[in-house]
Image: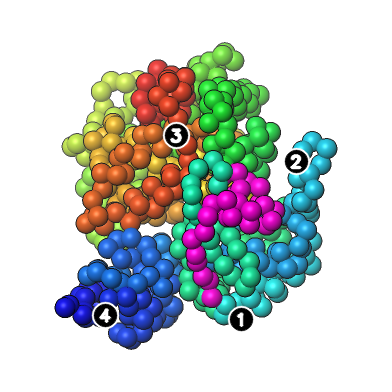
Amino acid sequence: MKTKIQIICVNNGQTYSVKPGTTLEELSKTIGMTTLEEPKTGAQLPILAAMVDHKLKELNYPLIFPRTVEFISYSHEEGRRCYIRSLCFVLQNAVRAVFPDKMFFADHALPSGIYCELKDSTPGEDGHHPNYFLTDDDVDRIKEKMLEIIARDLPFTKEKIRAVDAEKIFIANMQPFKAELQRSLGRFTCSIYHLDGQSDTFHGPLVPSTGVLTSFDLTAFSRGFVLQLPAINNFNKVLPMRRQSKIAATLEEYSHWCDVMGVVGIGTLNKQILEGNAIRIINLSECLHERKYAAIADQIYARRSEVKVVFIAGPSSSGKTSSSLRLANQCRILGLNPKVIELDNYFLNREDTPKDEDGEYDFESLYAMDLPFLNQQINDLLSGKEVEIPQFDFKAGKRTFTGNRMHLGDRDILIMEGIHALNPEMVSEVDQSRVFRVYASALTSLNIDENNNISTSDNRLLRRIVRDNRVRGITPEDTLLRWHSVRRGEARNIFPFQENADAIFNSALLFELPMLKYYAEPLLRRILPSSPAYGEAIRLLKFLDYIVALQPSEIEAIPPTSIMREFIGGQTL
């Protein structure tokens, strides 16, 4: 009888023979690999979890069959997710200890971390739970309790229980939206995590114990506070507090609108869809978008005597193309005459493009654009001159001219879209009073439940998977494998300049996740277990598993001018 199984460790390329049932934690200790080196700093970081055949597993996972194992730390994206989920559990326990009569909400992500709020457990006359405004002293008390829990190095444990029993736990925890989600899923069992006598669900593995959660901070912000997280490339350095008030206000506004709609989490959204209210949600969501486009057009019109150039920027799959077209239509209604130019036409010729640290052409660099020529053409247009607009031939890697001439009349405005449009250095030679900047992004603040927020990045990634497959012939696997590079470019070229915007357009739509599930789920299921993208596909499928999909008849109700049509097809803009 075979008594040993073969385990390949990706970290060192070695193969080990172990007894069936050996846990990942036991394996790491046996081979002397309990820490991993942080790539940027060389610091030794504790192992938090492992990728087993490309699937994320907790360290107490038993190895029964031959496997490929990659141990991960905070330097790995999945390691960071494990860390953040575990830290949120500690935070929640600390809040319950300090404010036992308050409801805790991990509301939405900010550049420095996660924005959190407390609410009164007793609803007001309008049925909503009033916010509890935290003081600096309140936040300090919560942080002190967190440090105490971490110092005790308490274990996280997991068990599977009956769904009806889990629902009772959530109600006792003052988590009605988590209970509603459990009801909407219609399952018989539920996985529950335990920490120091408290129980909850977290949608993904946790770290072994609280003792590794040493890097974080809390800072009072708005009505609540921000849970500041370690830097991606330096675990021992907490992200500095960046008070991006415009982004925070946009997220808060969307959260308030969801609350008004009676959708405060995936559970309540599922309930609305199951009760046949999907088309109503679609119509109201599209009305909100149209109102926002009109409001931005009104701002531009109010400054029409000086503003002649409108720049639109945003991260990948934020709906920039649709936004520029719909904003142009709103401007036309007001009597303005928009003329649209793609900033991509101002790329340098391929051989003149700067290269990155790997020696590859860096097309996302600001300096991949011919900045002097762009500034000259804009200034010529602003001074009333006629210019010939270039056309960039991406296949040949050359700028060409095809006789497309343009000048700006009294009612003309120039609309230009591109990733660097919020960076003032792009048009540093242009009079800034003539420029209006719009930032577009899918800034969803809809959460899975009270303490599990939805990543705006995941929202955009699902959009891109659907569009890439439909329009560009790119497989879901390739989209997933490229996403890290896309995100790195956004962090460098877009996010630092968000607050430069004169207006922010939130392209998130309340119905889009149920819609995207219909399209993305079958695409993700095509990714094979042998693919390096398999683990990410499984993570997204588990997330989509919490969502009730729209039916084809409901998707047909999405208007042809919707941003969503940019991704699923049928757009008439």
Residue denoted by label 3: 549
Does residue 524 show up?
A: yes
Residue 500 horizontal/vertical position (percent): 57, 44
Labels 1 and 2: the sequence-earlier one: 2
Q: Secondary structure at mark 1?
A: helix
Residue 128 marker: 2
Q: Secondary structure at mark 4?
A: loop
- Residue type, label 1: Ala
| Label 3 close to label 4 by CB (< 8 Å) | no
Q: Which mark is residue 151?
A: 1
Q: Residue at x 36, y 76 (%)?
A: 23
Residue 95 placement (x, y as % from top left): 70, 64
Among numbered discs 4 and 1, the one appearing first in the sequence: 4
**Type of amino acid under label 3:** Ala
Tell which of 21 and 362 is nearer to you: 21
Q: Is residue 131 magenta?
A: no
| CB-based contact (under 8 Å), mark 2 and mark 4 | no
Residue at 80 percent of width and 48 percent of height: 122
413 or 529: nearer the viewer: 529
